[in-house]
């Protein structure tokens, strides 16, 4: 019996040592796993949060792109709003021209060449063509409303110019107005619209251009 106990005691002691040696290792491994899990989870949450924010930002940007600001083309009382520059359609010529809206000019002006005065039934008439930017219209004949004398700034001489009435269209407005016939081929705009045209039918916003749609 003593011999059996002598054999069992070393075995029990060695088993205890093995148990003591392995237990801390397992605890350490489990602790490391827990620590790794705790570190990795916040990273996933942060990544998902960044994706959510990016998605929301993208949605906000797409909504902003879809918003279209429509500016008014008429006032509340029905008058046209004209910009500093507009497209003008002349039905008699079947041509569209660029026009400058000049709040400082009294009378409108249109670029005319080959101006020839003549009489018809005892009244003054003129025949002429509109020419600008490579466009030259057919010959037009209109009665003279009146004559004006224009003094040139570069000399003391004056020029006699005819004023005629002509139909024009801007946007949905068709109006007959006075035009001084003058050679404007050297100027940027073949048509100049003065206060005699827009004082009763339109208001001018010099901060805008081509407010009214071009005639089709």
Image: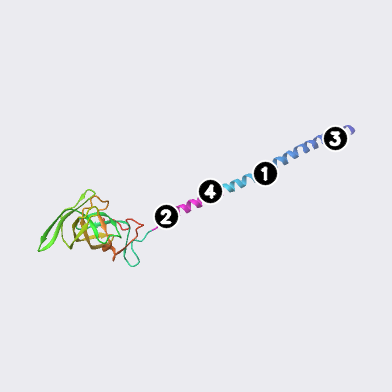
Counting labels gives 4
Q: Name the spot of residue 108 as percent of width and height, x first.
A: 25, 59
Q: Is residue 44 above or below residue 14?
A: below
Q: Mark 4 points at which residue?
A: 51
Q: From the top left corner, tell me how far across and down residue 123 is, in percent.
A: 12, 63
1 or 4: mark nearer the eye: 4
Q: What stretch is highlighted in magenta?
A: 48-69
**SS of the residue at dot 2?**
helix
Where disc 1 sits, the SS reads: helix
Marks 2 and 1 sit apart, C-alpha to C-alpha, by 48 Å
Dominant secondary structure, magenta? helix
Which comes before the other along the chain, label 2 or label 3? 3
**In the rendered structure, are the residues bearing label 2 and label 4 in contact, judged by CB atoms less than 8 Å apart?**
no
Image position of 10 with respect to 200: above or below:
above
Nearest the eye: 121 or 182: 182
Numbered tag placed on residue 9 in the rendering:
3
Q: Which mark is residue 66?
A: 2
**Mark number, residue 35:** 1
Mark 1 vs 4, N-terminal side: 1
Identify which residue is drawn at 60% across, 46% down: 43
- Residue 17 located within the stretch drawn in magenta: no
Asked whether the beta carbons under mark 2 and mark 1 sit within 8 Å of each other, the answer is no
Q: Distance between the residues labelled 2 and 4?
A: 23 Å
Image position of 59 (left or right of 124) = right
Mark found first going from the N terminus, 2 or 1:
1
Q: Would residue 72 be found to the left or right of residue 168 on screen?
A: right
Which numbered disc flags the more N-terminal residue, 3 or 4?
A: 3
**Considering depth in this image, is 63 or 181 the residue closer to the camera?**
181
């Amino acid at each position: 019996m003593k011999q059996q106990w002598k054999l069992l005691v070393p075995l029990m002691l060695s088993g205890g040592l093995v148990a003591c040696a392995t237990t801390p290792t397992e605890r350490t491994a489990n602790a490391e796993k827990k620590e790794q899990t705790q570190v990795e989870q916040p990273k996933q949450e942060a990544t998902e949060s960044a994706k959510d924010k990016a998605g929301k930002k993208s949605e906000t940007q797409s909504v902003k792109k879809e918003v279209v600001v429509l500016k008014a083309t008429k006032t509340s009382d029905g008058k046209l709003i004209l910009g500093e520059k507009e497209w003008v359609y002349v039905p008699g010529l079947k041509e569209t021209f660029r026009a400058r809206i000049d709040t400082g000019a009294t009378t409108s002006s249109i670029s005319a060449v080959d101006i020839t005065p003549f009489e018809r039934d005892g009244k003054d008439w003129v025949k002429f063509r509109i020419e600008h930017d490579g466009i030259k219209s057919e010959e037009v004949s209109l009665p003279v409303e009146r004559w004006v004398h224009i003094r040139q700034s570069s000399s003391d001489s004056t020029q006699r110019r005819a004023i005629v009435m002509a139909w024009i269209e801007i946007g949905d407005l068709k109006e007959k107005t006075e035009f001084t016939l003058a050679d404007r081929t050297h100027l940027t705009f073949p048509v100049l619209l003065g206060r005699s045209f827009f004082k009763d039918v339109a208001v001018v916003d010099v901060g805008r251009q081509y407010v009214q749609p071009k005639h089709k």
